Image (cartoon, rainbow, N blue to C red):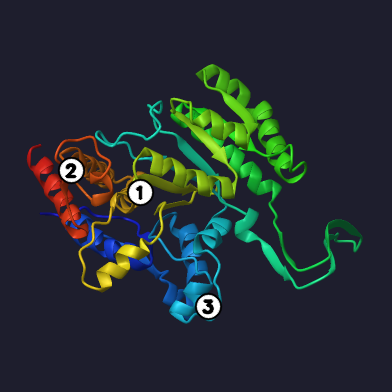
Amino acid sequence: MTKIAMKTPLVEMDGDEMTRIIWQIIKDELICPYVDLKTEYYDLGLEYRDKTDDQVTVDSAEATKRLGVAVKCATITPNAQRVEEYHLKQMWKSPNGTIRAMLDGTVFRAPIVVKGIEPVVRCWKKPITIARHAYGDVYKNAEMRIPGPGKVELVYTAADGTEARELVHDFTGAGVVQGMHNLDDSIESFARSCFEYAISTKQDLWFATKDTISKKYDHRFKDVFADLYEAEYKQKFEELGIEYFYTLIDDAVARIMKAEGGFIWACKNYDGDVMSDMLSSAFGSLAMMTSVLVSPHGYYEYEAAHGTVQRHYYKHLKGEPTSTNSVATIFAWTGALRKRGELDGTPELVDFANRLEAATIHTIEAGKMTGDLARITTLPDPTTLGTREFILAIRDTLDAEAAAK
């Protein structure tokens, strides 16, 4: 069989633990037998990030700017326990946060809908797409442990040397403090990406913050969205019959639980992180959600929205069987291959990505699935497959469907 040619490499960002194992199986069984895969490889595994003082993360983001399309495996953001476990030099920051800050884009996450995996929320009939701002907030914070009594202030020193100060808290004892920031340019890029995505998909757009409490920080987000909508997008939305709707984040959460879906929910960075996990789990599984960072500068980074599946990795190391859901990681690869094909004008690569996604869905709908889905499916008598066996079942479906054409 002649393999599908690629014109331009993908940026390949390898990851950690069980998802790193899955990553290699997907390449070996679902991609390399069919595609003459070209990638520029970066090892974002925790050990190599530590060895390079996290320079490899920066290098992978720069490569994405140069090549335009990246695919990323799930990675560890270390806490104190992980520093000890992996003997790290320091508690490195989130690689996702570093990459997103450098690419300055919006992360769009949507559930992968499959027959037999019904949403926990019964009124949800259509996917809900999370648009997550991918810069700043707690992911680029500065924080400090306050040992005892003292005053903490925000200090802004202008270019001309003048200062403005705002009291954070007058501590009478020990505590903690953190400072967050964002940029008008990044907020506007976020808003523009959301409006453009809503237009391209013909979906309503919701946006929510807590501007009644955060009267400067969150209110700035609200104002930028509102001003841009009125200046550039209101007429386009009205012509398409779609709506831009702003509300408070707590009201949005309440409304979501009674909505039918079929819209985009734009969230600030932390809100989008949390709510995308809630939505993916409620739609079926954390491993059943697509995730792509879209930069206004023309960069695309596809990833699985979940973590490294630590518990399964420890079982794998002991030689125990695992049944880890690889769907989101497969869809990260297909998303990147499809975009590469679109940008390079190679329709056969686009077609392959579409066929692999269809084979993945059809395998599950035929009753062959991993344990997390078998426990919640409405299909009768599902077959629970191990990690590798599920991927091999998808390969069999892909080959059978290709032969039937």
| Numbered disc in front, either 2 or 1 | 2
Examine the rendered structure and indicate whether residue 262 appears above or below residue 312. above
> In which quadrant of the rendered view does residue 357 lie?
top left
Q: Is residue 115 visible?
A: yes
Task: Please provide percent x and percent y for residue 12.
Answer: 37, 62
The quarter in which the N terminus is drawn is bottom left
Residue that label 1 marks: 344
Task: Please provide percent x and percent y for residue 188.
Answer: 65, 42
Give the residue at x 68% y 39%.
210
How far apart marks 2 and 1 lie (CA) works out to 30 Å
Give the residue at x 37% y 26%.
125
Which is more N-terminal, label 2 or label 3?
Answer: 3
Q: Nearer the viewer, residue 56 or 250?
A: 250
For mark 1, does the 10 Å Cα neighbourhood hold few (<14), some (14 to 19), or many (20 or more) residues? few
Give the residue at x 73% y 39%.
219
Q: Secondary structure at mark 2?
A: helix
The quarter in which the C terminus is drawn is top left
Q: Secondary structure at mark 3?
A: loop
Task: Please provide percent x and percent y for residue 7.
Answer: 31, 55
The numbered disc on residue 53 is 3
